[in-house]
Amino acid sequence: MNEEVTQYIQKTQAWQIEVCNTLRDLVLTNVPNVEERLQYGKPHYLKDGSYLAVIHVSKDKVSFMLFNATKIPEVKGFLRSMGNGDRKTVDIRDGQSVDYEQLANLVRKVSQV
C-alpha cells in the first residue's frame, strides 16, 4: 500500500474513509500486480502501466472511475459513462448502499483488457 494514498484517504470524512478503504481493498484484492500511486492528487491504480481505476473524494461524495470500460454497459442509477464511453464512474454518497461485489466484478473485467 502506498503511504501517500493512505494519507489522502485519512484526510477525508469518516464515512469517506470507510468507502475509500473498501474501494482500495477491492482493487488490491481483485487485481494481481496492480500498482497503487498518488497521481494528480488522487489515488490511481495501474495494471501493466495502463490506468485501471481512480478514487476521487469531493465534499459530498466519493467517485470511483474505471478505465478501459467500453464493453461494460451503463447501469442506470449506479454506473454512468464518461467521455467516449471508455470510462465508467460510480458516485457514492453518505449512507448509500453499494454493491461492492458488483464493483469487484467490474474491476476484474477491466483489468483483463
Image: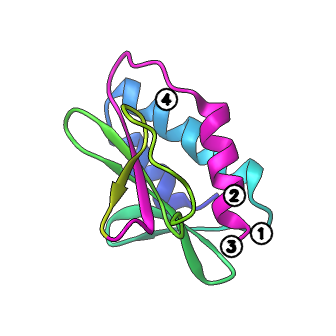
Which residue position holds label 1? Answer: 33
- Residue 99 covered by magenta stretch: yes
Which residue position holds label 2? Answer: 109
Q: What is the spatial separation of the Cα atoms under label 4 and label 1, in whole angstroms?
A: 23 Å
Point out the tag, 4 or 2, that comes first from the N-terminus: 4
Badge 1 marks a residue whose secondary structure is: loop
Which residue position holds label 4? Answer: 18
Q: Residue drawn 54% across and 59% down?
A: 3
Q: Residue drawn 47% across and 18% down?
A: 97
Nearer to me, 51 or 16: 51
Identity, as a three-letter code, of the amino acid under mark 3: Val
Q: From what the image shows, is residue 64 above or below residue 35?
A: above
Q: From what the image shows, is residue 63 above or below residue 49?
A: above
Quarter of image, res 2: bottom right
Badge 2 marks a residue whose secondary structure is: helix
Which residue position holds label 3? Answer: 113
Magenta segment, which residues?
Answer: 84-113
Instruction: Give the mark toward the camera: 4 or 2.
Output: 2
Nearer to me, 49 or 69: 69
